[in-house]
Image (cartoon, helix red, strand yellow):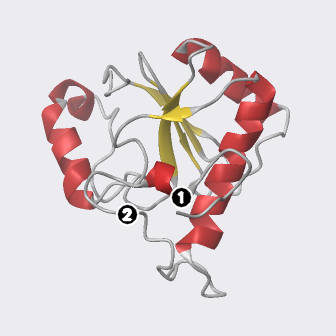
Amino acid sequence: LMRLTEHFTSEEWEGSDGPYPLDEIDAEDPAGRTWRETRLMPLAETMEAIRAKTGAALIITPSGGYRSEKHQQRIVDSHPEDRDAGLVAGATTSQHPKGRAADAYSSKWSAPQLHAIILGMFHAGELPHLGGLGLYPKFVHIDVRPRPSSGHLAQWGGSRTGNVA
C-alpha cells in the first residue's frame, strides 16, 4: 500500500488478477522510470484534480483500475455490442492493462454530469495528463495515455454498466 496523493493509494488500482505493477520499468520512457512514476502518478494526480473540482470522492469501480490483458479480453468478449461498435478496447489497446486508466464514479454526480465536468476541466487546461475520456451509463473512464501532438483527447461512450457498488 502506497499513498500516491492526498486521497488515493496504490491499492485502489489493484485488479482482481493482481496488484498494480508499481516497480515495472516503463519501456516507453527514455529515462527508464517505473510505471508508478510515468503512469500511476499522473493518473492519481488527474483523479485528485477532478475530485477537488467536483467536491466529491471518486470511487474506482471493482476491476476498474489495473487489469491484465487476459482480464481485459474477458470484458471485451462479454460485451459484444460494445466490442462490435468499437466502444470497448481490446486487450492490447486498452489503457487498463497499461496501468493508465480508471473507471470511476461519484455518489454526488451522475456519470454524464461527471463526464461534462471533466471535459470542461480538460478544455480549460486543468488536466494536462488526460488522454482519454469515456462515458458509460454508471461510470466514466479516465486515462492518461499520451496525446498526439494535435492535443486530441480520445473520447467515446458505451453501454457497459460495470460493477458499480
Figure check: 61 above or below 66: above
Q: Which quadrant: the C terminus?
A: top left
- Kind of residue at disc 2: Pro
Q: Position of residue 50 (x, y in %)?
A: 72, 34
The residue nearer to you, when weighing 79 against 153, is 79
Displayed quadrant of residue 154: top right
The residue nearer to you, when weighing 42 against 85, is 42
Q: Which residue is mark 2?
A: 19
2 and 1 marks in contact (CB < 8 Å): yes
The answer to whether one can see residue 113 in this image is yes
Residue at the (36%, 55%) spot, across then down: 93
Residue at the (69%, 27%) spot, across then down: 119
For label 1, the crowd category at 10 Å Cα-Cα, with few meaning under 14, some 14 to 19 and many 20 or more, is many
Q: Position of residue 65 (x, y in %)?
A: 43, 48
Residue at the (57%, 78%) spot, across then down: 34
* Numbered disc 1: secondary structure: helix
The residue nearer to you, when weighing 82 against 59, is 59
The furthest residue to the front:
1
* Numbered disc 2: secondary structure: loop
- Kind of residue at disc 1: Ser
Q: Which residue is mark 1?
A: 10
The answer to whether one can see residue 148 in this image is no
For label 2, the crowd category at 10 Å Cα-Cα, with few meaning under 14, some 14 to 19 and many 20 or more, is some
